[in-house]
Image (cartoon, rainbow, N blue to C red):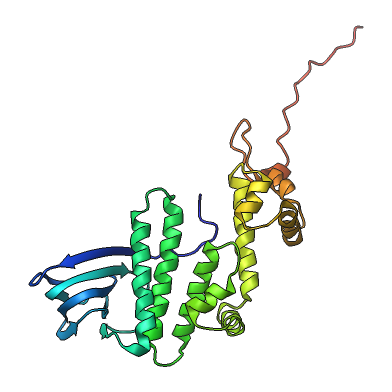
Amino acid sequence: MERFVNQKSIFAKTFVYNHDDGDFADMHKHACWELCYYESGEGKTIIEQNVFNHKQNDIVLIEPNHLHNDICLKNQTVYVLQFDYSINGASKLIEYKPEIADYIEKIAEQLKILQDVKADVSTPKELLADKSNEVTRYIVLLVTKIIQTKKTQYYYEQIVSYVKSYLYNHNKINYVALEEKTGYSTDRLRKIFKKHAKMPIYKYHSELVLTKIKTLLTKTNYSMKTIAKTCGFSSQSMFSQFFYNCCEITPLKYRKLYTAKPTDGVFKAGDRNKAKPSKPRKKTPKQTKKL
């Protein structure tokens, strides 16, 4: 199924490595950001000319196009995430400390979810990509919370970016889940979103749902009942009322009006209202009067 809104996909790759004492990776660089979470063990990473000694539960953040290596000093398991979503910061070591322990533990949890997504072979690729986008944006938000000492414009943009991604993948707004993810109360979160996204959360979500409905109506042969359930409505009547309030037309009429149907040629959505070319009249021979 094609994407319902024009949401930029994030390039993201995830790996898990188990290193023995003395294992190392030579100097290399990537065109994207790299986040390394060390679940266990000890090691050393050199980024350009800076040396970072890391231990269990530490994170090393590496900027794009920065030469770096990795040396294992004590058996270690490392989760690696490469992504092209910009972070407002520089390469650094994020040491595990009590004041940021909760953030690091959540990052570790999300990295393991990405591994599960990577291993999933039963879910359509498009849906897996959407889930990967949401999880990666959440990891970026968590990293931003750690490295931003004060609430900047960039910081709030990451919150809005994550909320948009969350709404894209969920039919209903779960404010309890959003409070847990962002660390803000519902009222505060609504104000932040409205200020930086230029519209209320409920309106943004309604537009996503409406776009999704229109796509399902015109691109699939799903029944109205199936579409209503897919888009999170508890009944078909609520679904129809929502659509009519937004578009001043019933879902069934919308489908009939904008769904392409094959004719002698290709029938495109919206062509029905165009005048059909008139057939050329047959010329009849002129009758001559008898004298």
277 with respect to 30 (left or right): right
Q: Inspect this view and state whether residue 88 appears.
A: no
Considering every residue shown, the one lying at the far top of the view is 291
Q: Residue at x 39, y 69 (%)?
A: 136
Q: Position of residue 97 (x, y in %)?
A: 31, 88
Q: Where's the C terminus, which quadrant?
A: top right
Residue 25 higher or lower than 235, as above or below: below
Q: Inspect this view and state whether residue 201 appears.
A: yes
Q: Position of residue 3 (x, y in %)?
A: 51, 56
Name the one closer to the observer, 23 or 253: 23
56 with respect to 103 (left or right): left
Q: Position of residue 103 (x, y in %)?
A: 38, 81
Considering every residue shown, the one lying at the far bottom of the view is 150
Residue 281 higher or lower than 27, as above or below: above
Total number of numbered labels? 0
Considering every residue shown, the one lying at the far right of the view is 291
Q: Residue at x 17, y 84 (%)?
A: 53
Residue 256 higher or lower than 6, as above or below: above
Residue 57, quarter of the rendered image: bottom left
Q: Position of residue 134 (x, y in %)?
A: 45, 67
Q: Residue at x 90, y 7 (%)?
A: 290
Residue 39, quarter of the rendered image: bottom left
